[in-house]
Image (cartoon, rainbow, N blue to C red):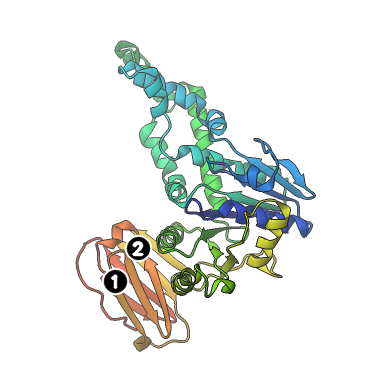
Amino acid sequence: MPPRTILYTGKGGVGKTSVAAATARMCAARGRRTVVMSTDPAHSLSDSLGVELGLEACEVAPNLFGQEVLASVEMRRNWDSVSTWLSAMLMNQGVDRVRAEELTVPPGMDELFSLLRIKQHWDDDDCEVLIVDCAPSGETLRLLGFPEVARWWMKKAFPWNNGLLGAAAPLARALDLPLPDREMMGELDRLIENLLVMDSILRDHENSSIRLVMNPDRMVIDEARRTFTHLSLYGYPTDAVVVNRVFPDEVEGTYFGPWRDRQAAQLEEVEAGFAPVPILTARFFDREVLGEEMHGLLGKELFGERDPAAILHEGMARELSTDESGTVIRIAAPFVEKNEISLQQAGEELVVTIGDTKRTIMLPSGLAESNPSRAAFEEGILEISYDDVRSGTAQAPRN
């Protein structure tokens, strides 16, 4: 059976490593063989767990294993032949060696190679639960569309097969250009296939999900909402939202009282923006969240008696699909009438009011300059459509 896989991501500095470690400790304490793995280039999982971690999973506690993946190692494992060939191509055109080597890895690919370790754990079947401490959300977002276009990229950037390689050899020798060899082409084929398999793993709604970690601060919430929209757009399920470092009620009447009041208002915005995905909250502790004791306290704050490995929300909170004609956003709105629904858009924010509930959707950049072309409400589903043209106004929902 595939491992239950949970990826934690969020803006840098929100405490996602602590949340990932606390989740892993709780899963292990329930008797599940658990691996917690960091793919964040700025690793802090070793510090959080209090154990020096390496490239391979090592035991931290009973049923708990930790691992810090190095992107440079994963790049050599998956990209060495391609990098060598690209460097030769660039140096042949007059680029110096150092710059050539830097330019052989597309931006964001290092994190992508690190995430391939997820597939390895699925192949090895060496754990029941896999917790992944991902890079900050901005880095993660750049990776979402890559597996979908990987095969196209392969054909366009490296459109050679064995026959074409042989036919092109005389011309390449005349122009003094290096040709890719069959070993490199085989490496590329394997990489593309692995990326596509990993993509299917992350979209496996029965076993995998993503959890967003944030603090109750406006800028952090906005980025998390944007990430949430992109996850929906690419079909990756988000089963929980974690709001970390919330000032407790005890600070009322102190210096931090006004901060607590502002956070309470921001938490209302979180409820509106991410419904119906469950919101998990944890207090701002009076000391650093390091080690077993503090991870236990954080885990209890977040999950209480709930199973931390459970799928906390099934299905997609909302669905976004896009094709040549445009983009459609679908939102489940049961038990309401058409006249209870209203839409309002301001820049990249689309505010959908359904009865007494308001949902604020952070639009992808391609839609932020457009207005909805039409809206329809049928059988409890609200559909909001955007055409490719960047004009027009939203029509009232129709039956």
Q: Are marks 1 and 2 in contact (CB under 8 Å)?
A: yes
Q: Earlier in the sequence, mark 1 or mark 2?
A: 1
Q: Position of residue 216 (x, y in %)?
A: 48, 65
- Report the Cα–Cα distance between label 1 and label 2: 10 Å
Q: Position of residue 141 (x, y in %)?
A: 44, 51
The correct choice, above or below, for 245 with respect to 166 in the image is below
Q: Quadrant of the C terminus?
A: bottom left
Q: Residues within 10 Å of mark 2 (few under 14, many from 20)?
A: many
The local secondary structure at tag 1 comes to strand
Quarter occupied by residue 160: top left
Q: Residue furthest front?
A: 254
Tag 2: residue type?
Leu
The correct choice, above or below, for 95 with respect to 215 in the image is above
Tag 1: residue type?
Gln
| Residue at position x 30%, y 75% in the image | 344
| Residue at position x 28%, y 74% in the image | 374
Q: Position of residue 18 (x, y in %)?
A: 61, 53
State the mark number for residue 363.
Answer: 2
The residue where tag 1 is placed is 345
